[in-house]
Amino acid sequence: MSLARLRTFVEVYRQRSISAAARNLNLTQPAVSQHIAGLEVAVGRKLFTREASGVAPTTAADELAMDIGDKLDAVESALAQARSRSINMEGVLQMIGHADFMAEVIAPRLLPLLQSGIRIRMHAGDGDLVHHMLVEGHCDLGFTAHPVTDKRLRSETVMEAPVMAVAAPEVAARIAQAEDLTQALLNESMLTYNLELSVIDRWLKKNHLHLGSHPPALVSQDLRSLRRLLIEGFGWTVMPDYLCHEHIQRGELQQIKAPVADTWLEYYMAWAPSALRQPRIAHARQTLLWELNPQYSK
C-alpha cells in the first residue's frame, strides 16, 4: 500500500471531492481516480460513492481514515523537515492574518525565515478570509483569533494574550472617578474591531457590565488605528496586551481597572495538511511555532 495512494485517499476524504483533491495534490483527476481504485483493490472494499456535489465516503473509508488519523500528516511533515535540512529553501511563502497581529507579533519573528532565503508575502484578513484563503490554497499559513473547526485544516495555539480595557490617562481618570462604571463607559466614545463587538463583549460580560445597543464611534479591523486615536485622547476600547503594554509603560495609555477580571484571547496558526508536503512550508511552520511558543522546541 503506497504512501502516494494513502496521501490521495486522505485528501479525497477531507475534501469530499476528486477535483479538489487533484488540485491540492497537483495531480490530474484521472490520476487521483486511479489511486483510489488501486487502494480499493488493496483493501478489498469500496471507499467512495459518487454524488452530484462530489464523493461520499463509505463505512470502509471512515474506518480507514480513523485508522490513519493524523499519522500520515506527521510522517509527511517529518519527511519535509528532513528534506528542508538538505535542500535550498528559496521560494515564496504566502501568509495571512489579522493586520495588527501580523505587524506586531509575526513580522519581528520572520528574520530566520528571510535569512534562509524564503521570500514572504503577508496578507491581511479577518477570520473568514483566513479560512477561505487556506482552504482554497491561496495562502500557506494563517493566523487567527478564531478557533479553527474546519476538518480540512489543522491548527496550533501560538499565543494567549491578556485583554484589557484602555484609554488615554485623562479619559481613564474620568471613567475611574465616576460612581457608575457602565454610565462612565457610555459617556465616552467606544472604538472597536467589528460591529459584533466580540472582544469588547467578552470583557463586558466577564465584568457584569451591559452597554445596551450603544453604537461604536469607530470600527477598524486594524487595532493599531484604534490605539492611535486612544493616544490622542479619544475614546476607549478593549485590546490585547501586546498592542498596548509599551504605551501603558510610557504613560500614553492607561488601563481601565476591571471590576472582576480581564479576559484572554487565544491566537492560532492554521494550515492545510497538504501544504506541509512542501519543505519550505513545513520548515516555516515549525520555525514560527518555536519562535511564538517555546514549548514546541522541547
Image (spheres, rainbow, N blue to C red):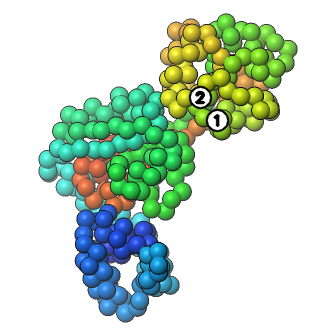
Mark 1 Cα shell of 10 Å, populated few (<14), some (14-19), many (≥20): few
Task: Determine which residue is flagged by label 2.
Answer: 219
Mark 2 to mark 1 CA distance (whole Å): 7 Å
Location of residue 56 in the rendering, given as x and y in whole percent from the top left corner: 47, 79
Location of residue 261 in the rendering, given as x and y in whole percent from the top left corner: 71, 29
Query: Residue farthest to the bottom?
Result: 44
Location of residue 293 in the rendering, given as x and y in whole percent from the top left corner: 43, 39
Q: Residue at x 71, y 28 (%)?
A: 215
Q: Residue at x 52, y 52 (%)?
A: 148
Q: What mark, if any, has residue 195 been given in the picture?
A: 1
| Left or right placement of residue 156 versus residue 176 in this view | left
The answer to whether marks 2 and 1 mark residues whose Cβ atoms lie closer than 8 Å is yes
Query: Residue farthest to the left?
Result: 87
Closer to the camera, 126 or 252?
Answer: 126
Query: Residue farthest to the right?
Result: 179
Mark 2 Cα shell of 10 Å, populated few (<14), some (14-19), many (≥20): some
The residue under label 2 is which amino acid type?
Answer: Val
Secondary structure beneath label 2: strand
Q: Quadrant of the C terminus?
A: top left
Image height of 284 relative to 59, above or below: above
- Which image quadrant is residue 65 in? bottom left
